[in-house]
Amino acid sequence: MRLGKITFLALTMLLLLTFVSAELGCASYPPETEGEAAPPEGTPTVDLAPNTQIISGPSGTITYGDVTFEWTGSDDYTATSELVYSYYLEGYDSDHSPFTSDTSKTYSVLPDGSYIFYIKARDASGNIDLTPAAVEFTVVTVPPGEDEGEDEGEVSDGSQLLILPNSEVSRIAVGGYGNTIYALDAVNCRLYKSDNGGYGWCDISAGVAGAPVWGELVVAPDDPNVVAVVTNGGTEVCLSTSGGAGFAVSGLAGKLAAGELIQCIAISPQYGGSNRELVVGTSTGVGGGRVWLNSNLFSWTDVSTGAAGWLPVVPAINGVDVFALSYSPCFAADRTILAVVASGPAPDTDDAYLYTGIRDLAQSRITWNTFPGYPVEICTPGGDTPGSPLTYAALALPLDYLGSDMSLRRVYACWSDGIGGNSNDDVYRIDDATVVRTLRRRGC
């Protein structure tokens, strides 16, 4: 009986406590900490692995063994600049590289074969991209002298060294840096490019927006991606700033006079930051040629007609045709442009001269023959030179040529009238205004 009373009292107390707890709002789980907010809707609650992307590199079949890959990555919590990467070239590397912050990798002289390049990112939490970015490519090259079954010195039609069997290459232009070469088949209106010193070529003719016949070819001395081709039978210039991926028509044809044809073209080094220009020389065959300046790569100005010094009084020249042009290697400092011109037939002087011009960057103009003794007839004293038209002319300047320094004005020039009877057609060295004939020596 006593035990029954105790049990009854215990049950009563338990019920009372349960009732009081419910009234006071007590819960059977810990309450939220004061001031702690729940995460916003949509916020990831798991640190995901990063993503990796290849942004440049070869793919498909290539004809060279030097390749470079560039990549980047992204992550939900780790900044891109803090990601690290590991790469692996299947078919060449034995294992993945250690994780580093590098975002590019170059492989040199890869053997012929098929490869897959993989790259994967790792974030600050140690999460690794489980689906690495990848690209497949195949290297196919034919080094000289290793074609099976060929006689020594003979190259088969299938060799990667050949631009194209039976092509008629008439002009070549080499970029100042790297291994970029352009070759022009003017007869068939084809333009080819090699990025590997001639070991494999690509036909980039489709990008040239010019009609036949094609003529001159030039590349910038400090940027192999800036290249120009003379088209439309010698009346138009097509220019590319993308290494031949695409060309734009410059519009010069609409400015030329009837019978005025382009004979030469030159592209300047970069100056004043990112500025670049080109000049074109034209002829009519009777001394009506001009120099056209394109100061922003797509707007032409005649910088010869009426220009100071273009038709000097001594010697008395009434008109010239332009057959060679060259920018000074130090154009950014001396603003000098050089030209080989030939004057019209008698009663004009009927001779070939070296002109110099000083470019006025404030305006689209050139002042000609300001150096003492210019223009210079390109022959030794007592010699003779032909007038227009010339078959061709050429200029070559040493890298230390400087128009503003008389002691460094050294130029090499040649010309030909194509007749063969003029014994004075040779190579001439012009030191300032002094002409020296570099005579051929027997046995050389």
Image (cartoon, grey):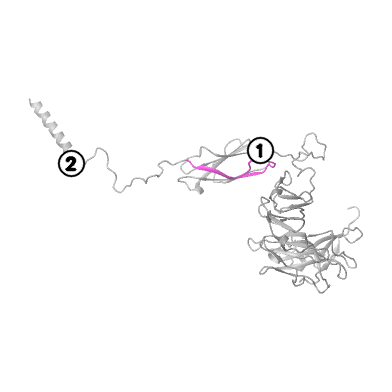
Above or below: residue 420 compared with residue 55: below
In the rendered structure, which amino acid carries the disc numbered 1?
Answer: Thr
How far across and how far down the image is residue 182, in percent? Answer: 73, 50
Q: Few, some or many C-alpha atoms within 10 Å of disc 1 (few <14, some 14-19, many ≥20)?
A: many
Q: Residue furthest top?
A: 1
Element at label 2: helix
Tell me the quarter of the picture where residue 134 sits: top right
Q: Would residue 39 be counted in the magenta stretch?
A: no
Element at label 1: strand
How far across and how far down the image is residue 190, in percent? Answer: 74, 48
Q: Few, some or many C-alpha atoms within 10 Å of disc 2 (few <14, some 14-19, many ≥20)?
A: few
In the rendered structure, which amino acid carries the disc numbered 2?
Answer: Glu
Tell me the quarter of the picture where residue 369 sits: bottom right
Residue 298 appears anywhere in the view = yes
Q: Residue furthest bottom?
A: 313
Residue 229 horizontal side relative to residue 286, left or right: left
Residue 275 horizontal side relative to residue 128, left or right: right
- Magenta region: 49-69
Residue 404 appears anywhere in the view = no
Mark 1 lies on residue: 138
Residue 173 horizontal side relative to residue 425, left or right: left
Q: Residue at x 82, y 61 (%)?
A: 413
Mark 1 → mark 2, Cα distance in angstroms: 79 Å
Mark 2 lies on residue: 23
How far across and how far down the image is residue 352, in percent? Answer: 84, 65
Above or below: residue 232 compared with residue 161: below
Tell me the quarter of the picture where residue 259 sits: bottom right
How far across and how far down the image is residue 201, in percent? Answer: 72, 45
Q: Residue at x 90, y 52 (%)?
A: 443
Above or below: residue 91 compared with residue 184: above
